[in-house]
Image (cartoon, rainbow, N blue to C red):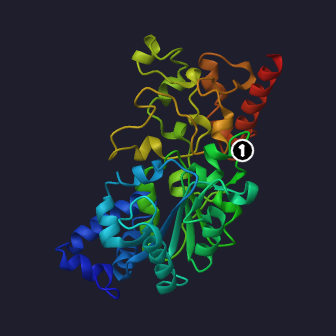
């Protein structure tokens, strides 16, 4: 693809019809909760766009976010990097290494000054001068600062980048911090999750390409289209919750009947993500569908909440069907309600601390 070609020109050369392009636009619009009227604008925006230069930095992480991205199905990972973006630098996926790799990053920054997007997975260690994670002899902190200087925007993918994740968990030995503390005022999008859903990542990139701006974000800088509701809001097991039917273990009658997993520690009521609708591996399944409760991995401090198999605090001591009436995840999380998801998280942490004191 020539540097000055639009995506439309390149895709046309590859035999992609306008009809197919509009279908893709419809898909992106639907997963981002955009009105039908936006489909044409989104498709036209993508068609007129040029391949977006992307520099992907990997810091304190496990490579799970990249693994997730490679499983994107619309667009596929191959389509994304060969048709839509120019992935100019990626620690894990680059064929070159050493000095050649670092020169590629610097060349992309110079050629796309003010236009390139920086994607970061992993937190940044600051303790002892940041020596706990370095690349080519450069600390993560210094590399991030240098790379963000002339960037258009930064996307923090995964909970480690968005909120500090596991590296930042108590006692945080490396002094890890999230990207938001070091973004230098650049537009920031957090796509949390451990790892984040592949199509959420590609959907956000497609939106940036089409409209040249950041999508609507929540108070944690996450796209509302994907993080606007709790997993519980869309969970197919919710009818069992409303009826007070819960699994008491992972191999009991309730578990075999597909009952709600609240009592075995599901954090779906306080976790904002689109797992229940987007699902994983091309829309095949998600943890709750596979029989395991949500761990709350897209929320801040999820690891320190611990007790993945401890149930959330029960409102007002309600039990059985009254649990549903208390609406821990319904009215309790609704607009203007007394309890918020964050409140429940804090309550849960406090209860764990009390238990530790007793021990």
Decide which of 184, 15 is in the foreground and name it.
184
Looking at the picture, how far across and down is residue 256, in whole percent?
A: 40, 16
Mark 1 lies on a secondary structure that is loop
Identify the image quadrant of residue 16. bottom left
Quadrant containing the N terminus in the rendered view? bottom left
Looking at the picture, how far across and down is residue 122, in whole percent?
A: 57, 54
Asked whether residue 228 is in view, the answer is: no
Q: Is residue 189 above or below residue 109?
A: above
Pointer 1 local density, CA inside 10 Å: few below 14, some 14–19, many at least 20: few
The residue pinned by badge 1 equals: 173
Q: Is residue 358 left or right of residue 34?
A: right
Q: Residue at x 58, y 49 (%)?
A: 159
Counting every numbered tag in the picture gives 1
Q: Farthest residue in the left direction?
A: 15
Asked whether residue 275 is in view, the answer is: yes
Quadrant containing the C terminus in the rendered view? top right
Q: Is residue 242 left or right of residue 313?
A: left
Looking at the picture, how far across and down is residue 280, in whole percent?
A: 38, 44
Q: Is residue 121 left or right of residue 355?
A: left
Q: Farthest residue in the bottom direction?
A: 4
Decide which of 325, 212 is in the foreground and name it.
212
Q: Farthest residue in the right direction?
A: 357
Looking at the picture, how far across and down is residue 290, in whole percent?
A: 40, 29
Decide which of 19, 301 is in the foreground and name it.
301
Q: Is residue 42 above or below residue 354?
A: below
Q: Is residue 167 above or below residue 122?
A: above
């Amino acid at each position: 693809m020539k540097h000055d070609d639009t995506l439309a020109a390149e895709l046309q050369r590859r035999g992609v019809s306008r009809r197919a392009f509009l279908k893709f636009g419809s898909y992106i619009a639907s997963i981002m909760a955009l009105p039908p009227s936006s489909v044409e604008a989104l498709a036209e925006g993508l068609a007129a766009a040029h391949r977006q230069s992307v520099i992907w930095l990997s810091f304190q992480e496990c490579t799970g976010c990249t693994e997730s991205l490679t499983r994107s199905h619309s667009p596929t990972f191959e389509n994304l990097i060969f048709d839509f973006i120019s992935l100019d630098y990626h620690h894990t996926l680059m064929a070159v290494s050493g000095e050649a790799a670092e020169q590629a990053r610097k060349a992309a920054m110079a050629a796309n000054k003010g236009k390139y997007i920086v994607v970061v997975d992993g937190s940044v260690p600051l303790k002892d001068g940041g020596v706990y994670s370095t690349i080519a002899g450069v600390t993560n902190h210094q590399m991030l600062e240098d790379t963000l200087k002339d960037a258009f925007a930064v996307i923090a993918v995964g909970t480690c980048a968005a909120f500090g994740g596991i590296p930042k968990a108590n006692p945080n030995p490396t002094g890890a911090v999230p990207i938001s503390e070091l973004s230098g005022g650049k537009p920031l999008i957090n796509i949390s999750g451990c790892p984040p859903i592949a199509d959420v990542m590609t959907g956000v990139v497609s939106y940036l390409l089409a409209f040249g701006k950041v999508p609507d974000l929540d108070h944690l800088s996450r796209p509302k289209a994907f993080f606007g509701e709790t997993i519980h809001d869309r969970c197919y097991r919710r009818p069992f919750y409303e009826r007070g039917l819960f699994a008491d273990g992972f191999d009991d009658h309730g578990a075999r009947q597909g009952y709600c997993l609240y009592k075995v520690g599901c954090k779906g009521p306080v976790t904002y993500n689109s797992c229940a609708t987007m699902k994983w591996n091309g829309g095949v399944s998600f943890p709750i569908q596979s029989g395991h409760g949500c761990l709350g991995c897209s929320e801040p401090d999820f690891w320190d909440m611990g007790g993945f198999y401890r149930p959330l605090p029960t409102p007002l001591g309600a039990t059985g069907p009254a649990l549903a009436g208390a609406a821990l995840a319904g009215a309790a999380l609704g607009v203007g309600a007394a309890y918020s998801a964050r409140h429940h998280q804090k309550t849960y942490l406090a209860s764990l601390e009390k238990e530790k004191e007793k021990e």
